[in-house]
Amino acid sequence: MGNKAYKFRIYPTAQQEVLIHKTFGCARLVYNKMLAERKEHYEKQGTQLKENTGYAKLKQEFDFLSEVDSQALAQEWVNLNKAYSNFFRGKGKVGFPKFKSKRNDRKSYRTLSTTNRLENGVLTIAKLKKVKFKQHRAIPPHYKATNNFTIIQNPQGDYYVSIVFEYDDEIKQKTIENIIGLDFSMSELYINSNGEKPEFPKPYRNGLMKLAKMQRKLSKMKKFSNNYYKQRRKIAKYHEYISNSRKDFLHKQSRQIANVNDCVVVESLNMKDMSRALNFGKSVHDNGWGMFVTFLDYKLKEQGKVLIKIDKWFPSSKTCSSCKTINKELTLSDRTYICNCGCIMDRDINAAINIKNEGLRLLNTA
């Protein structure tokens, strides 16, 4: 049994839009009130508040909460508990829960109502009833829609619904015959162990000039005026275009690799730390390497194939792929790997071959 989410564009009526925004506001109110209660209890008592007693009182205090989906409000209590547990379990890696702001450009709420369903091309959402939507892709007939719906409004004002589907597929593990290693590259996204590299479009880098011009125009406008909000929507739309361009390229590349190879080996890199340490923030984040690995992982699993992540401290760049000698004096500026054994090749191709060989070793050990 597995789960998979599909995201569709929805077109609510004016009346439905009003109800959606009411639900956004009520869900935010419930979350903030419960978070404030927890913080106040901790400051006074010095202990964690295990349960929020104020959730039942809120409905009595605010009559308008009964106008929206009750499941969406109950889900905020679940979200707050999850945020708290992540904070205390993360040991400093996850920040303390923050209050939600109505000025946040991206709004969403999640509902698990039993009235949520997608049947015969008709979408029904709790309280909203039937909503017009665009089904841009076919859903496999053995996929069953659950009542887990998330309503989203993006920064440019468009509405979407994310629906979780259940499926019961028996995935047969394939015999590993074709294996390939991928080495991260800031300029081309990756270089594989065969010496091939894609032509990465660099959507953010190529859009910087236009973005800067749009941001300058926004800075000269009167804050919170009609033109100010219009310009903000234009900037948000262009940011979404950049994001969609990147996702489109990553999906196509990951699909191409997953269809051809039975096993893919990559390094488990921390992109956030890498961008900070090397001062390559824009280049690192523009590539979307983490997103690419995520896409690659689920596409391989769907076909019974394997993704292997080797340790990030494995010296793939400094090791000779021919004689296994480690060159500790190799620097980042050295783009050609030269070894005393006579091996001379591109640094990234050499690293990709080492990544592939390490993956084979781990595979044989397992």
Image (cartoon, grey):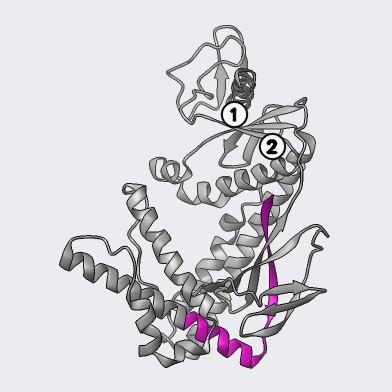
Amino acid at pointer 2: Lys
Asked if residue 3 lies in the magenta stretch, the reply is yes
Q: Type of residue at label 1?
A: Asp
Which quadrant of the structure image shows residue 36?
Answer: bottom left
Residue 1 position within the rendered picture, expressed as x and y whole percent measured from the top left: 69, 50
Secondary structure under tag 1 reads helix
When the figure is inspected, residue 253 is found, relative to residue 238, above or below; the finding is above
Q: Which residue is mark 2?
A: 197
Residue visible at 70% across and 56% down in the picture: 248
Residue closest to the eye, 12 or 195: 12
Q: Are marks 1 and 2 in contact (CB under 8 Å)?
A: yes
Q: Quadrant of the C terminus?
A: top right
Please name whichever residue, 62 or 192, is drawn nearer the observer in this view of the structure: 62
Task: Please say whether residue 228 is one of the residues in the magenta stretch.
Answer: no
Residue 344 location, x and y as percent?
61, 16
Dot 1: few (<14), some (14–19), or many (≥20) neighbours within 10 Å?
Answer: many
Q: Which portion, as a residue range, is magenta?
A: 1-25
Q: Which mark is residue 348?
A: 1
Res 265 quadrant in image = top right
Residue 52 falls in which quadrant of the image?
A: bottom left
Q: Position of residue 274 (x, y in %)?
A: 44, 41
